[in-house]
């Protein structure tokens, strides 16, 4: 079997906010999207809600290339939005935005979804990061698809950026998933013995008219319906570019690690989806403070320790991809916290200094804007390693 290309593509969804008020831009000017479209040549698209905008990198061969792409996309969106008094935030929920004030984009696909799902999709004021990894062989792609589910809670715990909802602290580090779980065909994916079994299952829904195609399956991990890739969808989007790139690098390395094991007639141990779902909840609730269950040891292990194990597990793959620095950055996330932790600290500090709750939430938005647009130049980043 020819080794997969392990090419990389990243999609990010941003919320557009008013720089003066910090609130969501419920009806951004049409000219903004036209400006972005002209500058980004097919790498930008509208999202379900008008207050959202999505970007996607070109197919990349290295993490450095992916980082440069995302840095350019973020800078471009920020520059164009600034002309209209707006800014993007790379956070999975807005600290005080109200979903009832938002309207969906007038596009055929979105109109059908809105009509079909009503309030469930109206509430979907959330953003994420999706990572595609090129695995051309069908059998290998579905074998890895089944095994990678084990690692989804680990990825989620390292990404949390949605601790607020409708102006309230939720007690969760990734409230995004709580909102997303209301949608059908979400959550952990089912396991399939091969590509044919997957397609036969999807075809049941297509033949009966429930779905047009598999793009309306929104699992935490899915085989892409358009490309020979595995698409990881569980993570919140990270305001800090370095954090998002580190998570993309980890997912890519996990794919290669499992492919290496398969070449040696080995595979990662299967675990009950019920048990993995418990780890998913712990990650959703606690983020990097979570203790996830190590099923082989029968113990709950702190994320800081699990990250060290992950770094060791994929060390050979990080060497092969030249992304040792990105993988090492996971340690910093585990030790210092994710965006959710920083947002909560900023909020509590503002409240304790005498600011109102609304003012404290605006301070959180300001921090998110700053982190989103503060993209280090790729050359400077590389030389700093």
Image (cartoon, rainbow, N blue to C red):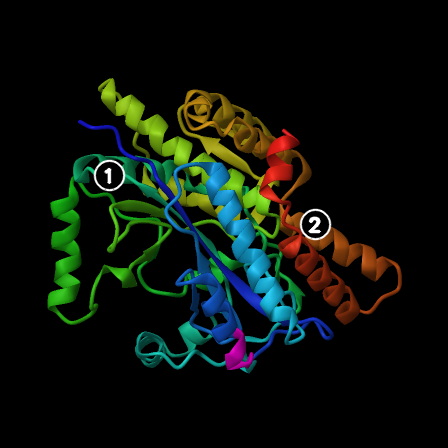
Mark 2 or mark 1: which is in front? Answer: 1
- Taking the view exactly as shown, the residue that stands out farthest to the right is 354
Report the front residue among 30 and 149.
30
- Pick the front one: 292 or 240: 240
Q: Secondary structure at mark 1?
A: helix
Image location of residue 182, percent across then percent down: 41, 65
**Whole-percent x and y of residue 287?**
57, 44
Vertical relation: 352 (above or below) 342? below
**Alpha carbon of mark 2 to alpha carbon of mark 1: how far?**
36 Å
Residue 292 drawn above or below residue 53 = above
Residue of label 1: 141
- Quadrant holding the N terminus: top left
Instruction: Report whether residue 88 is seen.
Output: no
* Residue drawn at x 82%, y 61% as measured from the top left: 351
Closer to the chain start, of discs 2 and 1, is: 1
Residue that label 2 marks: 342
Q: Residue at x 47, y 44 (%)?
A: 66
Would you say residue 29 sits in the magenta stretch?
Answer: yes
**In this picture, residue 205 sits left or right of residue 152:** left
How many C-alpha atoms fall within 10 Å of the one at disc 2: few (<14), some, or many (≥20)?
A: some
Crowding around mark 1 (Cα neighbors within 10 Å: few <14, some 14 to 19, many 20+) is many
- Residue 145: which quarter of the image? top left
Residue 348, image quadrant: bottom right
Dot 2 falls on a residue whose secondary structure is helix
Q: Please give the range of residues in magenta.
A: 27-32
Q: Is residue 184 left or right of residue 89?
A: left
Q: Is residue 93 magenta?
A: no
Counting from the top left corner in percent of width and height, residue 79 is at: 62, 64
Q: Position of residue 52 (x, y in %)?
A: 51, 69
Disc 2 and disc 1 in contact, CB within 8 angstroms: no
Residue in the picture at 17% in, 49% down: 198
Report the number of numbered marks: 2
């Amino acid at each position: 079997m020819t080794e997969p290309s392990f090419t990389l593509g990243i999609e990010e969804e941003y919320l557009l906010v008013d720089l003066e008020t910090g609130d969501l831009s419920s009806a951004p000017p049409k000219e903004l999207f036209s400006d972005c479209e002209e500058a980004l040549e097919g790498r930008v698209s509208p999202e379900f809600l008008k207050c959202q905008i999505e970007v996607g990198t070109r197919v990349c061969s290295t993490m450095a290339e992916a980082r440069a792409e995302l840095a350019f996309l973020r800078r471009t969106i920020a520059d164009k939005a600034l002309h209209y008094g707006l800014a993007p935030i790379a956070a999975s929920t807005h600290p005080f935005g109200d979903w009832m004030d938002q309207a969906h984009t007038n596009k055929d696909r979105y109109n059908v979804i809105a009509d079909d799902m009503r309030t469930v999709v109206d509430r979907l004021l959330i953003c994420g990061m999706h990572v595609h990894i090129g695995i051309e062989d069908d059998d290998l792609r579905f074998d890895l698809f089944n095994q990678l589910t084990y690692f989804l809670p680990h990825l989620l715990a390292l990404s949390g950026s949605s601790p607020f909802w409708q102006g309230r602290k939720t007690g969760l580090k990734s409230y995004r998933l709580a909102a997303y779980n209301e949608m059908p065909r979400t959550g952990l994916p089912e396991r399939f013995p091969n590509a044919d079994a997957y397609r036969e299952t999807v075809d049941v829904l297509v033949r009966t008219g429930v779905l047009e195609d598999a793009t309306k399956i929104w699992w935490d991990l899915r085989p892409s319906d358009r490309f020979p890739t595995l698409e990881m969808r569980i993570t919140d989007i990270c305001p800090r570019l370095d954090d998002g790139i580190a998570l993309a690098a980890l997912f890519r390395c996990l794919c290669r690690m499992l492919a290496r094991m398969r070449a040696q007639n080995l595979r990662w141990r299967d675990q009950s989806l019920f048990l993995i779902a418990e780890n998913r909840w712990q990650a959703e609730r606690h983020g990097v403070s979570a203790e996830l269950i190590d099923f082989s040891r029968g113990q709950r292990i702190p994320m800081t320790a699990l990250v060290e194990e992950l770094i060791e597990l994929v060390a050979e793959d990080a060497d092969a991809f030249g992304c040792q620095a990105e993988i090492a950055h996971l340690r910093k996330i585990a030790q210092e916290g994710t965006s959710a932790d920083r947002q909560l600290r900023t909020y509590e500090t503002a409240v304790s200094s005498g600011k109102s709750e609304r003012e404290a939430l605006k301070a959180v938005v300001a921090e998110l804007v700053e982190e989103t647009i503060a993209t280090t130049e790729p050359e400077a980043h590389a030389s700093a390693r």
